[in-house]
Image (cartoon, helix red, strand yellow):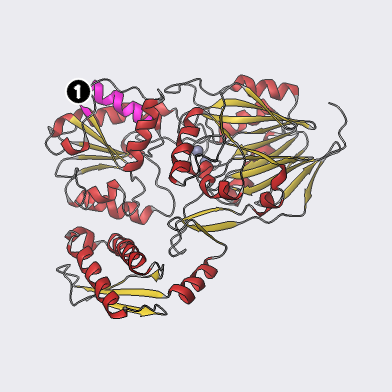
Amino acid sequence: MSKSAQSLFAIPLGGLGEFGMNMMALRYADDIIVIDAGMMFPESELLGIDLVIPDISYLKQHRQQVRAIILTHGHEDHIGALPYILRDLEVPVYGTRFTLALVKKRLAEAGLLESTVLREVLPGRRVELGQYEIEFIPVTHSTVDCVALAVRTPLGVIIHTGDFKIDHTPVEGAGFDIHTFARYGNEGVLALFSDSTNVERPGYTPSERAVVPRIEDLARSAPRRVILSCFASSIHRIQQVIDIAFRVGRKVAFVGRSMVDNVEIAHELGYLRIPDGMVVRPQDIRSFEPRKIIILASGSQAEPMSSLSRIAVDSHRFVSVDENDTVILSSRIIPGNEKAIFRMLDHMFRRRALVYYDNSGGVIHVSGHASQEEQKLLLQFVKPKYFIPVHGEYRHLFRHAALAHQLGVVSGEIILVENGHCIEFTEDGAYRRDPVAAGRVLVDSGSLEEIEEVVVRDRRHLSEDGVVVPIIAIDKHTGKLESHPEIVTRGFMSDNGNDLVGGARDIVLRTINTSNPEERADWSVIKEKIRVDLKRYINKQTSKRPLILPVILEV
Ligand SMILES: [Zn+2]
Ligand SMILES: [Zn+2]
């Protein structure tokens, strides 16, 4: 290794200390590259916020030096911030074919497709960028076309795993390229940044194929329809369900925007094999023989307006759940979503559906992230001088560090840092440096506005656009409206104030009347529907965006 007067800086900007919004910058001399640009969904207490992205002040301050954004895979927590970040930072984006296909869709929606340079990379190949040479190493995970990065710098090789698990029997594709990790390990790796998500789990994460026996059993013995929900990006899972459907003599249907979009993209690019004549159109589901169909639906996290949530309360146009239908939740229950998911499943149970949502009777879901033994294996292959756990809340990073310590393969130091904490690598060692600005930026996806602080946003809303509080009194026994909806407004002025309040009342009434009893009984659903409908109405009438806080009184 040649002597280098310059230092290499690693600057984590997201995903260290939280799950989601993964992003890290590497800087050597005048060359900055950014690894991933993810978003996360807000906690429910962030009223009116649609999503959260990393603070990129550091990148904006050094915009002349940012050479590229490099993506490891297409999950939202790795690409979701791109439509916002690329408005501030015009840099090329590198990613594999499937990842870029998902990116294209988002950029097109944001009107940024024309102005963005996208460069497709091949797993196993290398790209030169400034003073870096980057190799894209194939890894296995819960979506397709995922890579880890080996970044050769003048000071040594940096390996960033992205998200991974070590799946020896992948459904499709090259599999986990352990040999390349080992090759770099033998050559000498300066620093390893590795996925900590599942560090709390001992053992190995089962192969993606592990879900087949149980799901096939359920599909074969199901007395009627099968409705299976998984993440729309879980292309391997979707492939396996299609294969199972074929074997048990059922056809498949896809419902939900993200499910339909992803299946279309994956099919077009050859990542999904669907035998001819296998697909039933959504509008034909109702008339299709229930014993002959599997419906793949998005919405496994019970997002308020998703297909599965609508199906659960019988407000989906094409799909309903009836007695003896089989419902399979083939996905993780993300912490924070438990309440909404179990409330949704309760609706299914009430309809006497056969509901499967955990692995207690056989495996219906496996994780896409490495458990402890795989994390250890990777550390042993890579044998880095410095090890920095990434992707997790603080306890995950801490436990991953402890795991590495126990293993004793890190020759230099294990470095525990959080977002903004800068690490400087020199010829002599690695040092913690003063933190840079980092944190969460809250975004309202409707207006594409960035909000520095929720407080600021609320204040602005209140000062400029005011607040609208629709108050609805519902009889808890009948689910019927007790009285006319009240609309209370503060700081919300308009020339035609009374007309507007009258109109808003009509909107609320219409929203409630067009909802079915189950939706009405589910306050989170009905509140969200009212909020969305009123937001649209008021924005159209006044081009204002007041804070809308529906209140439901049970009388
Ligand atoms: Zn991922
Ligand atoms: Zn991730």
Q: Which residue is drawn at 42% across and 80% down?
A: 491
Residue 206 is covered by the magenta coloring: no
Q: What stretch is highlighted in magenta?
A: 237-251
Residue 401 visible somewhere in the drawing = no
12 and 33: which is toward the camera: 33
Q: Tell me if residue 348 comes above or below residue 163 in the rendering.
A: below
Residue 245 on the magenta span: yes
Q: How many labels does the image show?
A: 1
What is the x, y in percent for residue 400? 62, 42
The image quarter containing residue 466 is: bottom left
Picture quadrant where residue 465 is located: bottom left
Q: Tell me the element at label 1.
A: loop
- At a point 29% along the width and 75% down the height, the residue shown is 500
Percent position (x, y) of residue 318? 19, 43
Give 124 or 140, whichever is nearer the viewer.
Answer: 124
Q: What residue type is labelled 1?
A: Gly
**Towards the viewer: 236 or 351:** 236
Residue 297 point in image, percent of width and height: 29, 40
Residue denoted by label 1: 249
Above or below for 454 versus 158: below
Q: In this view, does 164 lie to the left or right of 259?
A: right
Label 1 near ligand 1 (CB < 8 Å): no
State the quadrant of the N terminus.
top right
Whether residue 278 is situated above or below residue 443 in the rendered picture = above
Q: Note whether 8 is above or below 313 in the view shown.
A: above
